[in-house]
Amino acid sequence: MASPRIILYTNRGCPWAHRVHIALKELGLAYEEVTIDLTTPREPWYLEINPRGLVPSLSYDGQIITESAVVARFLADAYPSHLFPPSTSVENALYRARLDFFVDSFFSKVIPHFWTGVRADSQEERDQAAQAFVDAVAKELEPLLVSGKGPYYGGSEKLTLAEVLSGSFLLRINSFAKPEYGLLSAKLHTLLETVPKFKRWLEATVQHESVNGIYDEEAVATGTKERLLSANMGTRSLICIYYKGRFMVAQYTQWDGYLEGQGWGILQFLLVPGNIERLKAGMEFITVVDEDTVQQLAEGHEYNTYDRLGQRVCQCGAVAPMSGPSPCVPSTLSRDTGSKLFELIASARSDSYMPFLLSLDFATDGLFCEYCYCVDLDNDTFELFGGHTRNVKGEEDAGHQKTGKFRFSAVHPQAEWTPNFLKAFSFSDLPKDLDDMLAKVTADNSANVEYEVDDEKDSDEDEHDEEEKSHETGAEAEK
């Protein structure tokens, strides 16, 4: 029988994708690896493979399988081994059920304290999170581990599916507590002495070559620190929709406000045939609200629990925003929504409630509003603004149309600053892709703006560019 063709769409820095690397290595399966860039929006070709845009995805003789735990279990079932016995007997079925319970306990009861420690603002909070982590291990996991036999789950001498699914996180627990990184409390390793079976399990797992083979400790730790630092501020922007002679949307967004982020996200939406017509139809169903209404919508909603990814969630199921504590409100009011608001509006129906808060004042904030975008449905244009320029008093009364560089001049006539106009694109002549957009913006602003198009990209990156955020400091949010 011919060997299957296996293609793994992955990113080695993602702990979820890392799970599949461990399984493939331990099973000795040959595969092709395609790296997905998690710092840029997903390319259309990858969304055809995985509409959710997440990693990992596995192509097995052309059959697509997604979600890390599902992929790992598929491989373990397709190739019965020491990882996971087939459920051909009651004994094996019980073993599988107990292993599943162990893994679920690890992620639902213990890992949330890991994320709390990573996101802690002070050493005291990190120390408290470390103690809570060990307390949870003592209660939930230590009784489920075996001593005196092999070091892996169930006393196995070889890796099991439990290590496949948890190994990438054990690597981070082990390395993030090192003083040189300081992402977790340095006391954690000492505290783990109180849970010897877990400590033995962790140490054996992180030393196994199938687990640590692709792990770049320094790159992951420093990358996580950088994401945490950038998450405190983000690149802020204002996304506007002008329709029927007025601003109907002026949405403040906290993240990725630069052209390659929110700008590219908006352009991707506009490039899809039919989307502009869908957007105009959906605009009929939006409702402009005030701050009092926003407060009323947030009443009774608190991010008071955690999901198994360690993300804080509300009773309604909404995940806490990357920007930190804030009211739980509809997506149309969230600072995290960004360019996704276009699809939300385009998908609206007559019974949809689409509240928007006009944040036009932010356009004149010369310090924090770094980019502005305006989709003008009256004039069929997409306008881009970067930085600020002096607001020449009286220009708004000089008979100029409120388009282009005069778009925001009348928002606050007495404001000192107004967004600096970069470029307007007609809907009939939109850039064909991100590089085309950056090149045209650069050409029109060569004297004061640098948006270099990198023609030296390595061929793999050029062919397979893609998103994150992680949100990640939601932390590593790809799954």
Image: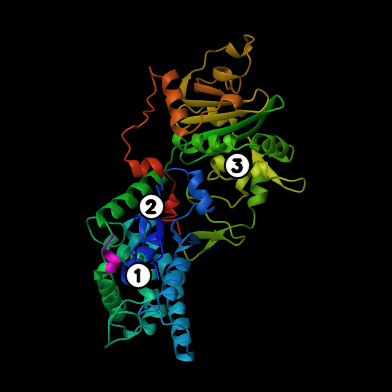
Instruction: Give the quarter of the image for residue 301.
Output: bottom right
Quarter of the image for the C terminus: give it. bottom left
Say which residue label 2 marks.
34
Q: Secondary structure at mark 3?
A: helix
Report x, y in % for residue 175. 27, 62
At label 2, counting other C-alpha atoms closer than 10 Å, the crowd grade (few under 14, some 14-19, many 20 or more) is some
Q: Which residues are magenta?
A: 210-214
Of residues 309 and 46, the one drawn nearer to the viewer in this rendering: 46
Left or right placement of residue 63 versus residue 403 in this view: left
Q: Earlier in the sequence, mark 1 or mark 3?
A: 1
Q: Nearer the viewer, mark 1 or mark 3?
A: 3
Report x, y in % for residue 220. 30, 54
- Per the picture, the main secondary structure of the magenta-coloured stretch is helix
Instruction: Note whether 395 is above or below 266 in the view shown.
Output: above
Q: Secondary structure at mark 1?
A: helix
Of residues 3 and 352, the one drawn nearer to the viewer in this rendering: 3
Amino acid, disc 2: Val
Say which residue label 3 marks.
341
Q: Secondary structure at mark 2?
A: strand
Say which residue label 1 marks.
131
Amino acid, disc 1: Gln
**Residue sitting farthest toward the right:** 350
Q: Nearer the viewer, mark 2 or mark 3?
A: 2
At label 1, counting other C-alpha atoms closer than 10 Å, the crowd grade (few under 14, some 14-19, many 20 or more) is some
How are the colours assigned in the image?
rainbow
Instruction: Note whether 29 is above or below 443 in the view shown.
Output: below
Quarter of the image for the N terminus: give it. bottom left
Mark 3 and mark 2 in contact (Cβ < 8 Å)? Answer: no
Instruction: Give the quarter of the image for residue 168.
Output: bottom left
Amino acid, disc 3: Leu
